[in-house]
């Protein structure tokens, strides 16, 4: 495989579906051998993209050409054998969109409804808050451990914003030692079993800097779109 500038990122649900599609897809048409002097007819003299799929027993290479007339599917050339295929648009489209269409965006495996309590750690201080589900469509109620009669609306709003954190990007080289930890949230279910965590970091306490998240799902620091309230 040729050397490229490589961006490594974990696949999200769309990426996992793409892997399944590639493992199962069948060519729409097998047009047989293609002579080199006819490559331009199919947009393969200068392929728009090349896909390398690495299997345990080797690498499969496909050169992607133009679409057949009246179709969104693609001509694809298998260089080792010189075979020309028409392959489904649904398999190729996510690849053409790149990492934005395939990467992981979710921070946690669990759902908000799985949370029974949280332990918040900020600058050496800790706070335990309990979550009580409310009526359908209404936000959950949060209250201090042992004080169900004291709902905390401010904390509920805070947790709603924490729940909106999502992964914005990958690929930046950043050292954990260079970051400032803003908080850690540990999540527990109704059986008081840990179900996940979230750590939020920043490069600087000044407004406008990047934020980074680390959780049970990300396995590494990832850039996040979190912004502090003004």
Image (cartoon, rainbow, N blue to C red):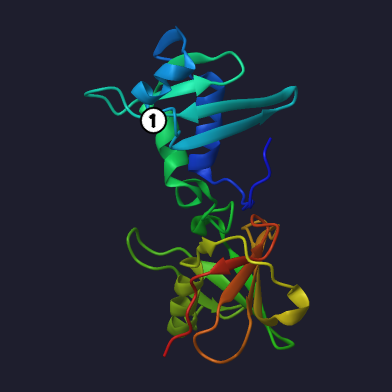
The residue that mark 1 highlights is 90
Residue 135 visible in the picture: yes
Q: Residue furthest front?
A: 37
Q: Is 86 in front, or is 180?
A: 86
Q: Is 191 in front, or is 222?
A: 222
Q: Is residue 173 above or below residue 207?
A: above
Picture residue at 69% right of the left edge, 35% below the top: 1
Residue 55 lies, in percent from the top left, at 69, 27
Residue 26 visible in the picture: no
Residue 18 lies, in percent from the top left, at 50, 34
Picture residue at 42% right of the left edge, 45% below the top: 97
Residue 106 lies, in percent from the top left, at 53, 55
Label 1 SS:
helix
Picture residue at 43% right of the left edge, 32% below the top: 92
Residue 174 lies, in percent from the top left, at 69, 71
Q: Is residue 220 above or below residue 84?
A: below
Where residue 51 sits, quadrant-wise, is top right
Where residue 147 sits, quadrant-wise, is bottom right
165 horizontally vs 90: left or right:
right
Q: Is residue 78 above or below residue 174?
A: above
């Amino acid at each position: 495989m040729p050397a490229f500038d490589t961006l490594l990122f974990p696949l999200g649900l769309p990426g996992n579906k793409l892997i399944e599609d590639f493992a199962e897809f069948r060519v729409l048409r097998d047009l047989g051998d293609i002579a080199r002097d006819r490559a331009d007819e199919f947009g393969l003299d200068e392929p728009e993209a090349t896909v390398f799929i690495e299997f345990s027993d080797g690498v499969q290479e496909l050169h992607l050409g133009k679409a057949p007339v009246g179709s969104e599917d693609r001509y694809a050339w298998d260089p080792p054998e010189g075979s020309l295929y028409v392959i489904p648009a649904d398999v190729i489209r996510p690849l053409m969109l790149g990492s934005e269409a395939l990467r992981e965006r979710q921070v946690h495996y669990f759902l908000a409804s799985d949370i029974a309590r949280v332990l918040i750690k900020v600058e050496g201080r800790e706070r335990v808050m309990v979550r009580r589900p409310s009526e359908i469509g209404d936000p959950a109620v949060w209250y201090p451990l042992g004080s169900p009669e004291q709902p905390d609306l401010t904390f509920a709003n805070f947790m709603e914003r924490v729940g909106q954190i999502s992964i914005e990007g990958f690929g930046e080289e950043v050292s954990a030692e260079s970051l400032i930890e803003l908080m850690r949230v540990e999540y527990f279910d109704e059986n008081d079993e840990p179900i996940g965590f979230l750590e939020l970091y920043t490069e600087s306490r000044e407004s406008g800097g990047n934020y980074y998240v680390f959780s049970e799902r990300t396995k590494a620091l990832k850039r996040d779109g979190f912004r502090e309230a003004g």
